[in-house]
Amino acid sequence: DSGVTQTPKHLITATGQRVTLRCSPRSGDLSVYWYQQSLDQGLQFLIQYYNGEERAKGNILERFSAQQFPDLHSELNLSSLELGDSALYFCASRVELAGGGNEQFFGPGTRLTVL
Amino acid sequence: GIQVEQSPPDLILQEGANSTLRCNFSDSVNNLQWFHQNPWGQLINLFYIPSGTKQNGRLSATTVATERYSLLYISSSQTTDSGVYFCMLLKAAGNKLTFGGGTRVLVKP
């Protein structure tokens, strides 16, 4: 168990709909990262938040948005869903290591199916 | 952006065999991690290894940052080692995270 929690585990919805995925980082970790894993694109970094602020953006579509709340949990909002958005969505939190490095730990993922 | 290539893409092993997985990258990196994605989809940390060598049980990893590659060694493989192995890198400049395409491993009993 990585200590990172994600809900829901599975989500089935229809094209055009909007969904919200939720992530809670490990206790004490300030960063949350979101990733998408699809069959054709592999694992892709979407966005990072640190202590409530956006820190880095990857290949995140404009239809997707995220935020991190004062209690450090994060939500990823996906709107106007398309069939191609079907994927596993992971979040990760980061621990700072002595010596300046950092290590990420992944949650169990949310499997989104768009019909 | 940084290019990350993992090889081989697929590997079939007999239980008890040893193997080496490789991750080549095109630019200097701050962080490098190896993960195992099990058949249930969970991503499990194996190593944080931007340089040097680490060992954990039957697994070990070596990163030669100056030559831009990392190796993951699996010894005495077991069926529970099946899954996909990914390397993940954070580029030194630009804070950009990139995953390799993965090596899919199947260990047969």
Image (cartoon, helix red, strand yellow):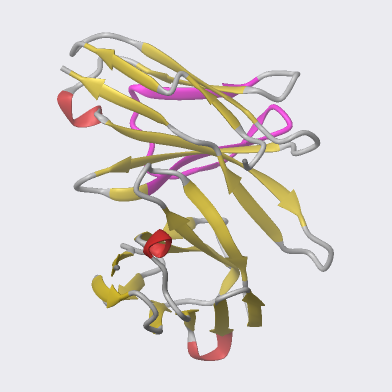
The secondary structure that most of the magenta stretch takes on is strand
Q: Is residue A73 left or right of residue A8?
A: right
Q: Is residue B78 left or right of residue A114?
A: right
Does residue A51 show up magenta in the picture?
yes
A3 to B11, vertically: above or below: above
Task: Report the span colored magenta.
Answer: A44-68
B35 to B12, vertically: above or below: above
Could you say which quadrant of the image residue B33 lies in?
Answer: bottom right
Could you say which quadrant of the image residue A23 lies in?
Answer: top right
Q: Nearer the viewer, residue B4 or B33?
A: B33
B67 to B81, vertically: above or below: below
Residue at far right of view = A98
Percent across and percent down for residue B58 are 55, 76
Residue at far bottom of view = B67
Percent across and percent down for residue A114 are 21, 20
Percent across and percent down for residue A16 are 21, 10
Residue appearing at x 49%, y 36% in the figure: A108
B50 to B17, vertically: above or below: above
Residue appearing at x 45%, y 33% in the figure: A109
Residue appearing at x 29%, y 68% in the figure: B109
Identify the image quadrant of the N terminus of chain B.
bottom left
Does residue A18 show up magenta in the picture?
no
Total labels: the figure holds 0
Percent across and percent down for residue B68 are 48, 84
Q: Is residue A31 left or right of residue B60?
A: right
Residue at far front of view = B109
